[in-house]
Every structure is written in structure tokens, then in C-alpha cells.
């Protein structure tokens, strides 16, 4: 497993993006930077080893300069999530950075017909509320991972991505391409929906690079 993790992280090693910092941002005003991880069961760590969810792993990658909060709630949709205590806890966390990975449940065949028409409006409402927090957080939205189940969900993700692009264009938030990171890596999603431990490492490494401009160091 260690060898596989090292090989996976090595995929991210390369020149940092132009203008990116060499390391994670420093402690802010004497306090750790607060990172809120918002999402569904994938963020919550469904089916993975304890301590191997992507929020757990990115907390280790970022180190003591960050305080990471995992607000992932299984089985939730974008609109439904905004009505939960998990979201209210994320708001009360008053984060400096928010990474949102919702949409996997929205694109399921029984849900997409109802989710699609209002998806942009619901996402805009969430980002507006986050932008009004006292901490004025940087917000990133993630394309959801690939769904390898042959039920049409993956086709719906391809319809979802342009909607997320529209959200990003209108709000100037960042986009993290988790979907692209899993291209050709279906073996990391054994139940066809939830990434395994190594898949969670891939998510953490992709988010880390988006936040810092650098690849994480292999353990």
C-alpha cells in the first residue's frame, strides 16, 4: 500500500503553478487557517479506513498551519445539505477556505431530473452565504469523482460540469477537477461510487495542489 500511495502522489510532482506559493499558506494572524470540507458521504469518508478520508489526509499534508473541519454528510444533495446542521456547523466554523464537493447524489438517475433545473441557483445561494461570513473565505468547488456504475449517472456528471463552470464564472470561485483526476482509475472506486483509501488520497492530493500550487510529499 505504501508503494502504491507513493506512486500515486508522485503523479503530482512537478513544477508549481505560476505564481503559487512554495508551501501551504502561513499561519494567519497568529492562528491556523481554517479549512472547511463540505460534501456528501465521499467527503465524510464512507467505506474507508478510519483516518483515511480526504479531509483527514489533507490535514496531515497541510500540517499545523491549517485547522481542517470535515462537514461531509452521507446521502445528501446540494439543496438538502444547505438545510442541515452539518452546513450550519460549517458556517459557525467561520472558515478561511471552503472546499465543496457536492453533486454525486444530485446526478443519480432518480434525482437529476429534479436537481438539474435549480442546481445553479442553489449553488449560487450557498456561495453567497459563504461569501458573507466574517472570515470572507476563499471558496473552491469540485467536480465530483467519476461514477462507474452503468446507470447513466456518469452521463449526468457530464451535464453537471458545465453548470458548475457557470457557477464559477459568475462567482469567481475556484474549480478543482476531481472528476478528471479519476480518469482511467476506476479501480479506485470499488463500489462504483465511493473512492477507496487510495482514491481518497488522490482527492486529498488534488485539493492540496489546488490550494498550494504544489504536489504533496509522499509519506
Image (cartoon, rainbow, N blue to C red):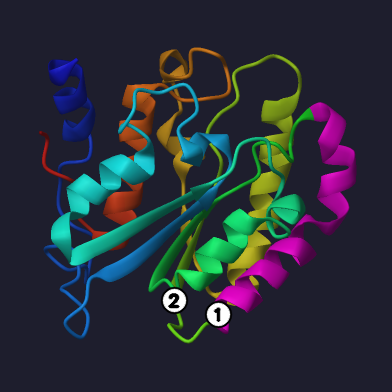
Query: Is most of the magenta stretch helix, strand or loop?
Result: helix
- The reply to whether the magenta stretch includes residue 199 is no
Residue at image location 63% in from the left, 76% down from the top: 129
In what quadrant of the picture does the C terminus appear?
Answer: top left
**Quarter of the rendering occupied by the N terminus:** top left
Of labels 2 and 1, earlier in sequence is 1
Query: Which image quadrant is residue 89 in?
Result: bottom right
x, y percentage for residue 77?
Answer: 72, 45
Comparing 166 with 26, the one in front is 26
Residue at 74%, 36% (x, y): give it: 107
Residue at horizontal 57 percent and vertical 84 percent from the top: 132
Task: Mark 2 and mark 1 in contact? Answer it, CB < 8 Å.
Answer: yes
Residue 150 position within the rendered picture, expressed as x and y whole percent measured from the top left: 70, 14
Which structural element holds mark 1? helix
Q: Residues within 10 Å of mark 1 (few under 14, many from 20)?
A: some
Q: Position of residue 7 (x, y in %)?
A: 17, 24
107 on left or right of 31:
right
Q: Quadrant of residue 204?
A: top left
The mark found on residue 137 in the picture is: 2
Residue 196 falls in which quadrant of the image?
top left
x and y, in percent, of residue 37 in the image: 45, 54
Does 111 appear in magenta?
Answer: yes
**Circle 1 sits on which residue?**
131
Q: Residues within 10 Å of mark 2 (few under 14, many from 20)?
A: many
Magenta residues (range): 109-132
Amino acid at each position: 500500500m505504501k508503494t502504491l500511495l507513493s506512486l500515486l502522489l508522485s503523479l503530482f510532482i512537478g513544477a508549481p503553478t505560476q505564481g503559487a506559493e512554495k508551501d501551504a499558506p502561513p499561519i494567519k494572524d497568529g492562528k491556523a487557517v481554517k479549512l472547511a470540507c463540505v460534501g456528501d458521504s465521499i467527503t465524510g469518508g464512507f467505506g474507508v479506513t478510519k483516518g483515511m478520508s480526504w479531509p483527514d489526509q489533507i490535514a496531515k499534508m497541510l500540517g499545523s498551519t491549517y485547522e481542517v473541519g470535515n462537514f461531509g454528510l452521507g446521502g445528501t444533495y446540494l439543496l438538502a445539505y444547505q438545510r442541515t446542521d452539518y452546513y450550519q456547523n460549517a458556517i459557525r466554523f467561520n472558515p478561511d477556505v471552503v472546499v465543496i464537493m457536492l453533486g454525486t447524489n444530485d446526478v443519480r438517475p432518480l434525482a437529476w431530473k429534479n436537481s438539474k433545473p435549480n442546481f445553479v441557483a442553489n449553488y449560487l445561494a450557498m456561495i453567497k452565504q459563504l461569501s458573507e461570513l466574517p472570515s470572507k473565505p476563499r471558496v473552491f468547488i469540485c467536480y465530483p469523482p467519476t461514477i462507474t456504475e452503468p446507470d447513466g449517472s456518469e452521463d449526468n456528471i457530464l451535464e453537471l460540469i458545465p453548470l458548475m463552470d457557470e457557477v464559477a464564472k459568475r462567482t469567481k470561485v475556484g474549480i478543482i477537477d476531481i472528476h478528471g483526476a479519476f480518469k482511467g482509475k476506476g479501480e479506485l472506486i470499488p463500489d462504483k461510487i465511493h473512492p477507496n483509501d487510495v482514491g481518497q488520497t488522490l482527492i486529498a492530493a488534488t485539493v492540496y495542489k489546488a490550494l498550494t500550487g504544489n504536489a504533496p510529499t509522499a509519506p
